[in-house]
Image: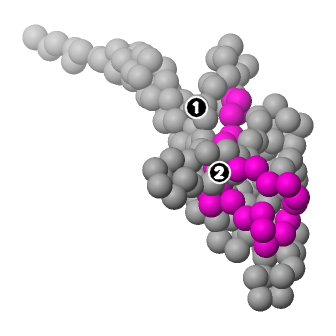
Amino acid sequence: MRTKPLRRGGQVSVEFILLFTGVLVPSLIGLTFLSQLLWIWHSVNDFTRQGAGYAVSHCWEASSQNVIDFMQQNVPLMPFQQQFQDGTATITVSYFSVDPTTGILTPFACDGDCSTACIPDRVVVTVTGFQFSSFFSYLGLPPVALPNFQASAAMESAGCDPEQGVCLP
């Protein structure tokens, strides 16, 4: 007596489809989301450091507008860079002087702008309010508010030449 072999071709296809749609596709979407988030995180972090580097080598201004203008004009190529240009993400630049006896940072104040007599000791550049909304936002995912980014650096020349007594903006 002859028996027919069992056919399981359909069962394997159904299991593959379930595995693919239930595990592999969500894993790939999650990996893509995480990769894009880390790329943006690194870009904003590096952008903050670049702003601090500019601030330590250029003139101190009470309004810090020279540093903010530089940062807004030199936003790295990345998604959501318009948040820096339209003011959604806030850039704050703070200058400090170091108390020589205690070593405590105090807010820097000077009577004038950009002179050899007005050079702070440290600068802190902070980026706040940046939100990452991935290309998966059409799925109803809300934007992810990234934490504040902060870079601190010791002042260098602040754009001033002490021998000439002049400062370049």
Question: Residue under circle 1?
Answer: 147
Residue type, label 2: Phe
User: Disc number at residue 96?
Assistant: 2
Q: Residues within 10 Å of mark 2 (few under 14, many from 20)?
A: some
Q: Is residue 56 visible?
A: yes
In the rendered image, which quarter is residue 18 located in? top left
Residue at x-position 54% and y-position 30%: 29
Q: Residue at x 77, y 88 (%)?
A: 163
Whether residue 122 is situated above or below residue 94 in the rendered picture: below
Residue range in magenta is 108-131
Q: Residue at x 67, y 22 (%)?
A: 143
Q: Residue 69, image x and y in percent?
A: 87, 53
Residue 142 on image: x %, y %: 67, 17
The prevailing secondary structure element of the residues shown in magenta is loop
Task: Report if residue 50 lies within the magenta region.
Answer: no
Q: Is residue 39 visible?
A: no
27 with respect to 158 (left or right) = left
Query: Tag on residue 28?
Result: none
Whole-percent x, y for residue 123 in the image:
65, 54
Q: Secondary structure at mark 2?
A: strand
